[in-house]
Image (cartoon, grey):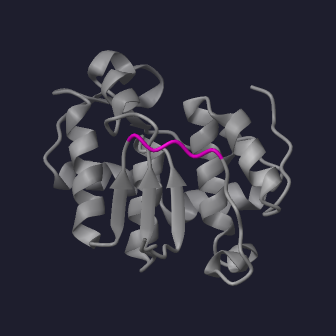
Amino acid sequence: MSSKQYDVLVIGAGASGLMTAYMAAQRGRKVVVVEKANKVGKKILMSGGGKCNFTNLYVEPENYISHNPHFVISALTRYTNWDFIGLVCEYGIEYEERKHGQLFTLNGAKEILSMLLAECDKTGLVEIKTSCEVKAIKVSKSQRLQDISKWNRWWLHLAVCQFQLSGGLVLAMKLLNSSAIMSIRPVPD
């Protein structure tokens, strides 16, 4: 039995998971995305009645809850809503603004899903596995994951955001706390 080495594990192949995988791969990381469902992006395809609210015009740090407000500022500075809007435009995806600056696709969420998958594919560093449920994560001292406190902290935060959005926060907390990566107290909605 052969085992592959990955730099980043992303749990969930929804919008946040695929975006996290794409961004990590852009930085040269070898990524595996595991998805419990038999297809990727099921929630993307259902969101907004199938139209997909892919971002907002007004994205400000004060709209986010964080134990470290500087992290939110840093994250929103590194990749802005305008960066994502630019990517959407590169793919020729038409969209409209609705109330409160929400941006929705005109021709369906499938375009956003296809775009995210294409960006992951272009890197050549993202592998996606479906029908794959994660029940535990074991950190071995001999593996590169031991350096998570250095460069992976940002990805870990993104992964926690992904879990909060997809409703899997309880699983995220169990996995993070049991693997001795770090202990995080959830913030109620």
Image coordinates of residue 56 in percent, x first then y, are 45, 36
Instruction: Specify whether 142 is left or right of 32.
Output: right
Instruction: Specify whether 96 is left or right of 94.
Output: right
The residue drawn where x is 43% and y is 39% is 57
Predominant SS of the magenta segment: loop
Q: Quadrant of residue 109?
A: top left
Q: Is residue 133 magenta?
A: yes
Instruction: Specify whether 150 is left or right of 106.
Output: right
The residue drawn where x is 13% and y is 47% is 92
Q: Quadrant of residue 105?
A: top left
Q: Quadrant of residue 168?
A: top right
User: Outermost residue, front direction?
Assistant: 1
User: Outermost residue, top direction?
Assistant: 49
Asked whether the viewer can see residue 136, the reply is yes
In magenta, the rendered stretch is: 131-135
Asked whether the viewer can see residue 60, the reply is no
Image coordinates of residue 33 in percent, x first then y, are 43, 55
Q: Is residue 25 magenta?
A: no
Image coordinates of residue 173 in percent, x first then y, are 76, 43
